[in-house]
Image: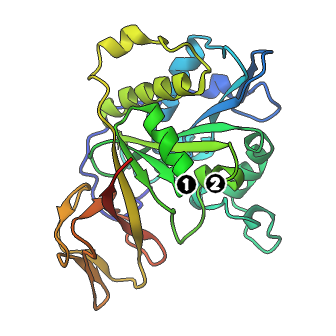
Amino acid sequence: MSSATGLPNIYSVELSPPDISGYASGNTGIPYVWTFDSGVAGPHVAITAVVHGNEPCGAIAIDWLMQMNLRPLRGALSFAFVNTAAYEAFDPEVPDATRWVEEDFNRLWGEGVLDDPDRRVTPEVERAREIRPWLSTVDLLLDIHSMQHKTDPLIIAGPTVKGRTLGGQIGWPGIVVTDKGHAEGQRMRDFADFADPASPRNAALVECGQHWEAEAADVAKDCCIGFLRATGAVAPEFQQDRMNARPPKPETKYYEVMQPVTIETDNFRFAQDWRGFEHLEQGTLIGHDGDREVLAPHDPTVLIMPSRRLWPGKTAVRLARPIEG
Ligand SMILES: [Zn+2]
């Protein structure tokens, strides 16, 4: 198996993906999807992990919550391991090779995509169709991810004000980024009502740090705690002993992605080895797409998650500005 980017991996693999085969049966009729109903009225709250197969921090967090036999105080609580086929193919020798089996699971959620009869049916499309009936009943979603580069963890709040509000209520990590997603296709966190400003259904996506750094698993647990408290699925003091030993709750900072840089040529390269959260002056050279210069469009321009997958149609980096919450 070769590296997905053709680039050497520059980060050590500190996390070991837990064995999740014991969760395969699920209790919903859908493999790896578990739902616990309190019997009391309340929202259906869900946490999802391994939408990308090489991001083990979310699997560690859900495994931890499942092992404590957590049950909701009200409503229903679900846990789901999503792209398990990609997850099971993880190889620490080539850890970036298993983000997906055939395509990015997190670009399939635009209207009509999963029902398009002309679309190629990949393992990701099959799994997305399998979980969609369950996902369609989720009111409040936390989708756990991690990043290519070691940079501050952040919550991707999607396009709506309600997403930004939920991000702030979760509280950990303390960076909330509003954005419209990728030209390549819609994310699960933006599926249907999650991105409809008029719907009370809501979602957050958390990027917990570098894919394989040990701290990412702790950030994933922190974020789950903040999310579960914010939704009322658990008591406000849930896991307070743990949080007393963690860094204090940060003051949330908010950013808005003004535009993604979508790659147009097969010759995109960055001008510097950007890692994310650099604050650039307007006009700073970010990179080249073929002969075209990509310049920082505003002052400051904050780089969000520069990618190493620099292929046509992909997002090279997102360009953001600080905003008020
Ligand atoms: Zn991811």
Disc 2: CA contacts within 10 A as few (<14), some (14-19) or many (>=20):
some
Give the CA distance from mark 2 to mark 1: 6 Å
User: Which is more toward the observer, 169 or 308?
Assistant: 169
Q: Are marks 2 and 1 in contact (CB under 8 Å)?
A: yes
Q: Residue at x 33, y 62 (%)?
A: 320
Q: Position of residue 146 (x, y in %)?
A: 41, 44
For image coordinates 32% across by 26% down, the residue present is 249
Residue 197 circle label:
2
Q: Depth check: 90 or 48 in front?
A: 48
**Residue 95 visible in the current orientation:** no
Q: Is residue 61 above or below residue 190?
A: above
Q: Quadrant of residue 78?
A: top right
Residue 128 seen in render:
yes
* Disc with the residue nearer the chain's start (2 vs 1): 1
Numbered badge on residue 160: 1
Residue 107, horizontal then vertical, whole percent? 59, 61
